[in-house]
Amino acid sequence: MKIAVGAFSIESNSFAHGVTSLDDFKKQIYFVGSAISRECAGPTVELAGAWDVFTKHGVEIVPTLVATSSPRPPVTRDAFEVISSGILSAIPSDVDGVYLSLHGASYCEHDDDPEGTLLEMVREKIGPEKLISISLDLHAYYTKKMLAHADIATAYRTAPHIDLYETGARAAQLLVDALAKKQKPKVYRAEAAMITSAERHDNTKGPFKELIDLCRNAEAKPGALTVSLLATQPWLDVEELGWKVIVTTSSADVDGQTIADEIAREAWNRREQFMETVALSPTQALHEAVTAEGLCAVSDLGDATNGGSPGDSTVLLREALRSRDSGTFILSLADAAGATYAYQTGAGKEITLSLCDGAPGEYNERTTITGVIEKVANKKIQYTHPAAGGSLDDPGPSALIKITTSPLTTYLVLHANPVRVIDPVIYELFDLDVRQFSAVQAKSPNGFKVGFARVTNEYRLANTEGPTSADLFTLTFNKRPKPLFPFERM
Ligand SMILES: [Zn+2]
């Protein structure tokens, strides 16, 4: 059995400024041909899970190309063409099947549906009979093109996402099984015309758990191989935006449509429950966080770097500078020019910096700080959050700056490149124990709760503006379908 393996994985954000270039992938996870290994993208990501299954079954693995990025702005045309042609050209004509690790909500500057396009290209190359299996993020939105070309599709079952490995392993196992049994599986899809703020996507409780449980129950039905709820990341301005349910059956003779329709209807029936929010105003969230007993995480919902925001929001920094509370607060900010200058200035020096480029009133409004550079660093971080699968990231030149111009002592970790703040590793870059602080900033709607659990279980959600705002009404959608909940309350 010969299976070609590859990855093109990035969650794109239509509202974030800038683009994601080939260089951005190369700074993160980018491997071609024989450089690809089980662990190249991280020891517990989808690729590793699939690799282990294929190895166990004696599959001849044909590595193609692996390109993975943290959530970012739209991918450049050039990057997509290099990545897609790299995957395509490495697929031999005599393969039995193809496994691709995708995200399901990526976006290119020239193509709203690059993953659908990639699958179409693979299908064209291998023909209609050979099998394509894909693994996806739960925040995929599964387009018509993806539906047309994938034979097996399965997504994470957890949010926060901690089952990357299992999802890759499942996609691989279903592919091996189908090939062994000479089956031709089929994916069915149902839509629920809704998007919801990601901080309510929690598989451990409430309506989201109920829906995930329905998927598990549905998998007990004969011929239903895998059932996935796709809750769609909401910061994407595309025509096919909206929740989906996908069901892979063992053949076209099994009715997966009824299963998908039923769960999509249950999701729709719960739509108003996803509008309840526990997010606080930025002022209140920071106040409660710094005055809470012990360390408290305050998550910056509008600047969620795991939702594609560039990590350059100054909202909480400005709140800290205005705060009348005493205590200590540590936060992170991506600003290439400021970080590089601070890094070059070096530890021990006082520094005044004008940070970020936003106009007054914007989420990344230019903000001036004065402080002392305590430490500098320029090395990679390794995420400890299970959703990152042990992967590395490069913050670039970085500095730890202590700002003492307000009653609240603020420590700013300034870094050149955006990073995910789903766990405390960006702060630990400076050998800090974040438990010494009153409050620490996270940048994620939900996933940070798992990542920061090793330092605190106390948190507040700050309803900040920005490219990943929890308040979807603050974002300007041009292409989204209509009607779509919550914009049209049908
Ligand atoms: Zn996700």
Image: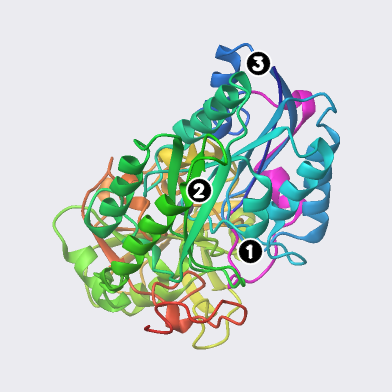
Place of residue 255 in the rendered image (x, y in percent of width and height, measured from the top left): 47, 46
Looking at mark 2, is its residue's CB closer than 8 Å to ligand 1? yes
Instruction: Find disc 3 in the rendering and name its residue.
Output: 59
Q: Which quadrant is home to the C terminus?
A: bottom left
Which marked residue is nearer to the observer: mark 1 or mark 3?
Answer: 3
Point out the tag, 1 or 2, that comes first from the N-terminus.
1
Point out the tag, 3 or 2, that comes first from the N-terminus.
3
Instruction: Find disc 1 in the rendering and name its residue.
Output: 73
Q: Residues within 10 Å of mark 3 (few under 14, many from 20)?
A: some
Question: At x 36% / y 51%, what residue is drawn?
Answer: 448
Question: At x 77% / y 66%, what residue is drawn?
Answer: 110
**Picture layout, residue 457 above or below residue 109:** above
Which marked residue is nearer to the observer: mark 1 or mark 2?
Answer: 2
Question: At x 40% / y 60%, what residue is drawn?
Answer: 264
Q: In the orientation shown, which residue stands out farthest toward the front? A: 253
Residue 380 painted magenta: no
Place of residue 349 in the rendered image (x, y in percent of width and height, measured from the top left): 52, 58
Name the element at disc 3: loop
Mark number, residue 237: none
Question: At x 54% / y 36%, what residue is drawn?
Answer: 391
Disc 1 from disc 2: Cα separation: 17 Å
Instruction: Find disc 2 in the rendering and name its residue.
Output: 137
Q: Amino acid at mark 1?
A: Pro
Name the element at disc 2: loop
Looking at mark 1, is its residue's CB closer than 8 Å to ligand 1? no
In this orientation, which residue lies closer to the viewer: 183 or 11? Answer: 183
Q: Amino acid at mark 2?
A: Asp
Point out the tag, 1 or 3, that comes first from the N-terminus.
3
Which region is colored magenta? 11-37
Q: Amino acid at mark 3?
A: Val
**Picture layout, residue 21 above or below residue 68:** below
